[in-house]
Amino acid sequence: MSQSLSQRLKTLSCISLGLLILAIGIFMALGGVYLISLGGSWYFALAGLGLIGSGVSIARKHPAGAALYLAILGATVVWSVWDAGLNFWPLFSRLFAPAVLAVPVLLTCPAIKIGTGQISKRAAYGSAAFILLALGMTGYEAFQPRPLVVAENLPHPRPGIPVGADAQADWSQWGRTPSGTRFAPLEQITPRNVAHLRVAWTYRTGEIPTGPEGFVVTPLAVNGMLYGCTQSNVIFALDPDTGQERWRFDPHAHGNLRPRCRGVGYHDAFLNDRSALPALPGSPATLCTRRIISTTVDDRMIAVDANSGQPCTDFGDHGVVSLRTGMGPIKPGFYFPTAAPTIVHDLVIVGGLVWDNAEVGEPSGVVRAFNVQTGALVWAWDLGDPAYSGLPPQGQTYTRGTPNVWSTPAYDEALGLVYLPTGNATPDFWGAHRSAADERYSSSIVALDIATGQERWRFQTVHHDLWDYDVPSQPALYNVPDGRGGTIPALIQTTKRGQIFMLDRRTGKPVADVQERSVPHDTMADDHAAPTQPYSVGMPAIGTRPLDEHRMWGITPLDQMMCRINFRRAHYEGDFTPPGDRTAIHFPGWFGGMNWGSVSIAENLGYLIVNDIRMGVTTRLIPRALYDAAHHGPDAEGTGAAQAGTPWGVVQGAFVSPLGIPCQAPPYGTLTAIDLATRKIAWQIPMGTVQDLGPFDLPTHLPIPIGMPTRGGPVTTGSGLIFMAGTQDFYLRAMDVRTGRELWKGRLPVGAETTPMTYVSAHSGRQFVVIAAGGTEASRKMGDYVVAFALPDNGR
């Protein structure tokens, strides 16, 4: 009886295994034939046909089945090396799953009779053991860091000179200083002791983000307190040593489609030199000599006393200035500032975000400067009509639909210039309606005179932008070595394209060479694409290698094949593939490249630290009538948009496999150090693991350092550390700025998609590193945490 049962189990295992291989083979053969018809690889069709034969034979207990499968595996090894080279992750995609399936094939072999005998158990089990050993070694290798560029034989750093060098321990602006370099000249936490960092305190705001909300603030550390804001613009002040709440102010903001607040502004009337500016109406109030300025998601600007959180009654209408004045009609959610206000002397400079792609004629992209004491308008920069330096004439509005400034400016006090990163005139993916001003200022850096708001220069990073390549990050100001013993006053601007532009911040002329290169420009008859685009050839480009079929990836050959099919079906001509009525792939996509988290410059070494995202995106333009018939109400960001007022709606998506994994080979996010003296990459590493985010946006609990899309940005310190989160797993990390080697990571309760900050408490003398952890857009776990790390009291 037992022998009969054993035989039945062996027969059942053969049939089950054979049917599984047969199903895989049918899928691969059909998909492979379709891929061939698209001009793609023949491997999948041929391998699929072989697997069909193998599966049928194994199910019938025929000895040829196992032999055929092993032959296919051997041929797959040869093809994989030919197709992908000796690169770990591309080979993993092609070989790991077939090798896993080879183990049950070999273990089932002894049940397959050959005449009156059987296949040698020793040979079968020995081969299975060999493959298991290879799989184990592969698994071990999967957990090892794999730098893309190793820090070896580097020249001794030749630092430049910081702009307005500041040795104070405060973090007084969103980028710490007006230069936006996120460099803190602090040396208490060092590469030697950073491994001893521990959670010092945790503060909870009481507002856990839901839906499209995002808790992404970078707090300020100034005036003996920490200041931040929640996604609903509740302002909070914390004790810097304990995290205990000192006060909070709720402006009761509401009515926004995607609420978030990246930071607040701080002004101290005793520390600002008013002589640099013309006389302004009003006089400083005795109350609120130190004040916090915040914008809200319902288009207001608020001033509160930095010590108590009480409204500054001398500012606007009892502490409130409406940002709707002069703007005309604003639909709910169609205009709202998310960046921290920029405080320059006695001015508050404010731009704003508009709801991408909804319709033409959205609210103006005007940038305005207000008196920080009274809230009175001082100047306005209306891109569509520079003649308006104040409010528009009665009955008129600032020019609607112009490019906006939704990110954060930087400024140079000595030059008297503020530098604005601009977005696009909406909508993003069709631009035949755009004005001459839209074409001039879209996706640019514009320098304005701080005192008057008059334009001094501009530089455009994308011509006739049809790809949502607005300039998302804060410019970084640094005096770079000129190679002759002096320095050049530079502005460094990262972009979603992965291009890094280095300009002379006095004139806007490139310091690092920029070339106009021909790009694809055949597009629909009712629009056009620019025939050339600017490439910053004098600086490294990050994550810009063009896609091809060989770069398609998947956890298994099946989802890799689907990515190959979708790649071949789509319209892709490399950089600047024009959008059209056929699905087009854009790489880098509108997520980045580099995004709003911005960069850091280790000012004492002259290293530019850049994190990036490597994900393709797709667009397809849909004729107006068809789009309107199929879509009602606003789409989620990144899925589609009406583009009302144009002939086309747009459907958007990420270029990912059926498992939700980017279709190109990893890494999907990196951290890079660029030596600004040599303008070469010093090192580059993948950032982040799949521990908390894997296929289908589910955690894998495996800390495999594949390199994940990065949000937020880095911070550097005088002791030679980089702090960064934003990697989709729930960690804040510390890296050695000279090598990129990870020295420490601290577990967070949820993910963090913002930039950390660091300061020294004036009371305790301890250095803290602080991060807001609100969760990530892809994660299903959100939070309301502000977490501070510090060394133990004994400094170890």
Image (cartoon, rainbow, N blue to C red):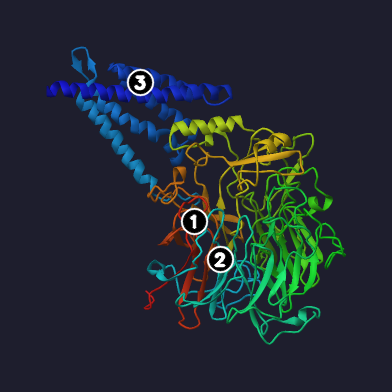
Q: Position of residue 381 (x, y in %)?
A: 79, 64
Who's the residue at 72% across and 79% down the image?
A: 373
Q: Which residue is mark 2?
A: 230
Q: SS class of the residue under badge 1?
A: loop
Q: Is residue 720 visible?
A: no
| Secondary element at image label 2 | loop
Which comes sooner in the sequence, label 1 or label 3?
Answer: 3
Q: List the single residue furthest toward the left.
A: 1
What whole-number distance in Å separates the C-alpha atoms at marks 3 and 2? Answer: 58 Å
Rendered location of residue 486, percent (x, y): 68, 68
Q: Which mark is residue 443?
A: none
Please state, as top left, top right, bottom left or bottom right, where the C terminus lies in the image: bottom left
Question: Which of the two discs, 2 and 1, labels the residue nearer the N terminus?
Answer: 1
Q: Of marks 3 and 2, which one's residue comes earlier in the chain?
A: 3
Q: Alpha carbon of mark 1 to alpha carbon of mark 3: how far?
A: 49 Å
**On the image, numbered disc 1 is attached to which residue?**
151
Nearest the eye: 290 or 560: 290
Q: Which residue is mark 3?
A: 55
Vertical order, 585 against 283 (above or below): above
Q: Nearer the viewer, residue 568 or 601?
A: 568
- Judge left or right: residue 173 versus residue 72: right
